[in-house]
């Protein structure tokens, strides 16, 4: 809920929370079953992470945060 609120400036409707929880659970399952996918997903970007930090949990959370940033309601400053 906190991430959604910080990105959009609004409290998420319960349906959105349910969708985000489902997305997290499904992502966590995928990244747990295929830890190499978690490492690859977290390997993008300018600031590399140590391999020990590339956990399925972090990958799943990062995936959910990325989805929140892609919402039409996301607040952008120009």
Image (cartoon, rainbow, N blue to C red):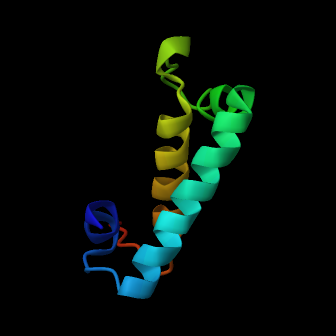
> The C terminus is located in which quarter?
bottom left
Confirm whether residue 69 shows in the render. yes
Q: Position of residue 6 (x, y in %)?
A: 26, 64
* Residue depicted at 37% across the width and 85% down the height: 14
* Quadrant assignment, res 65: bottom left
Up the image or down, 22 lies above or below 73; here it is above
Vertical side of 48 occupied by 55: above or below: below
Q: Left or right? Give the position of 15 relative to 1.
A: right
Is 36 positioned to the left or the right of 71 in the image? right
Left or right: 78 in relation to 29: left
Q: Residue at x 37, y 69 (%)?
A: 76
- Residue 50 seen in the current view: no
In the rendered image, the vertical position of residue 52 relative to residue 20, given as above or below: above
Q: Position of residue 54 (x, y in %)?
A: 54, 24
Quadrant location of the N terminus?
bottom left
* Residue 44 sits in quarter: top right
Image location (x, y in percent) of residue 74? 41, 73
Q: x and y percent of residue 66 in the render?
A: 52, 55
Tell how many labels: 0
Q: Is residue 43 left or right of residue 8?
A: right
The residue depicted at 41 percent of the width and 75 percent of the height is 17
């Amino acid at each position: 809920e906190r991430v959604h609120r910080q990105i959009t400036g609004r409290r998420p409707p319960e349906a959105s929370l349910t969708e985000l929880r489902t997305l997290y659970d499904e992502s966590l399952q995928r990244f747990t079953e295929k830890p190499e996918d978690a490492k690859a997903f977290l390997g993008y970007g300018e600031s590399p992470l140590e391999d020990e930090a590339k956990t399925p949990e972090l990958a799943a959370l990062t995936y959910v945060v990325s989805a929140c940033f892609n919402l039409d309601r996301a607040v952008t400053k120009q």
